[in-house]
Image (cartoon, rainbow, N blue to C red):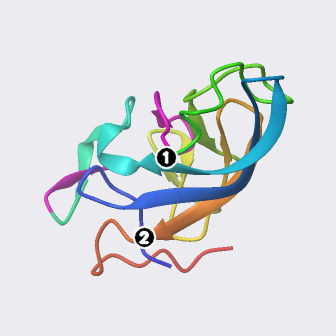
Amino acid sequence: MFANTQRAGMAFAMPDVCLTPPGPTPIPYPNFAANPMAVSAVYKVLFVCAPAHNMRTKVPMTNGDNPGITGGVLSRSVMSTSRHTMGARKVLIKGAPVTRLTSPTMQNRTNARGMTVAPSQTKVLILAP
């Protein structure tokens, strides 16, 4: 699969069940995390002129669950962080496994499980398990 970078790409999780007023009522929302918003990328390793992502890279803010202002059912947060939960175990960048297209994610802190669905670039492939 294609390696994740700061250049582009997006992770998607569904459902992100958040408590929505009035009530609060639990309602499922889609949750999106944009790779260009990520922090702690590996700035000394570039894939197609963009910093590489590894397991330490996080997206500080997600979108899609904005109406659920009372917070997620599990995380009690809204629009919170996204991080990868698995990467290529045999390819390390700055000591952590590299992440790639279809790598699983945990979004809105721990409220929704998803994966990277849009590629950051289409030249560098990570073919390790």
The vertical placement of 55 against 12, above or below, is: above
Q: Dot 2 lies on which element?
A: strand
The quadrant holding residue 12 is: bottom right
Residue 20, labelled with which disc? none
Judge left or right: residue 56 versus residue 110. Answer: left
Judge left or right: residue 37 versus residue 69. Answer: left
62 within the magenta span: yes
Q: Dot 1 lies on which element?
A: loop
Of all residues, the one furthest to the front in this rendering is: 22
- Residue closer to the observer: 80 or 55: 80
Judge the density around disc 1: few (<14), some (14-19), many (≥20) Cα neighbours within 10 Å. many
109 within the magenta span: no
Which amino acid is tagged 1?
Asn
At horizontal 59% and vertical 70% (from top left) the residue drawn is: 102
Identify the magenta region: 49-63
The quadrant holding residue 116 is: bottom right
The vertical placement of 12 against 58, above or below, is: below
Instruction: Quadrant for the C terminus, please.
Output: bottom right
Residue assigned mark 2: 118
The vertical placement of 61 against 105, above or below, is: above
Residue 45 visible in the shown view: yes
Of all residues, the one furthest to the left in this rendering is: 49
Q: Position of residue 56 (x, y in %)?
A: 53, 34
At horizontal 33% and vertical 65% (from top left) the residue drawn is: 120
Judge left or right: residue 47 versus residue 114. Answer: left
Magenta span: predominant SS is loop
At horizontal 33% and vertical 55% (from top left) the residue drawn is: 5
Q: Position of residue 23 (x, y in %)?
A: 83, 23
At horizontal 49% and vertical 46% (from top left) the residue drawn is: 54
Residue assigned mark 1: 54
Residue 87 visible in the shown view: no
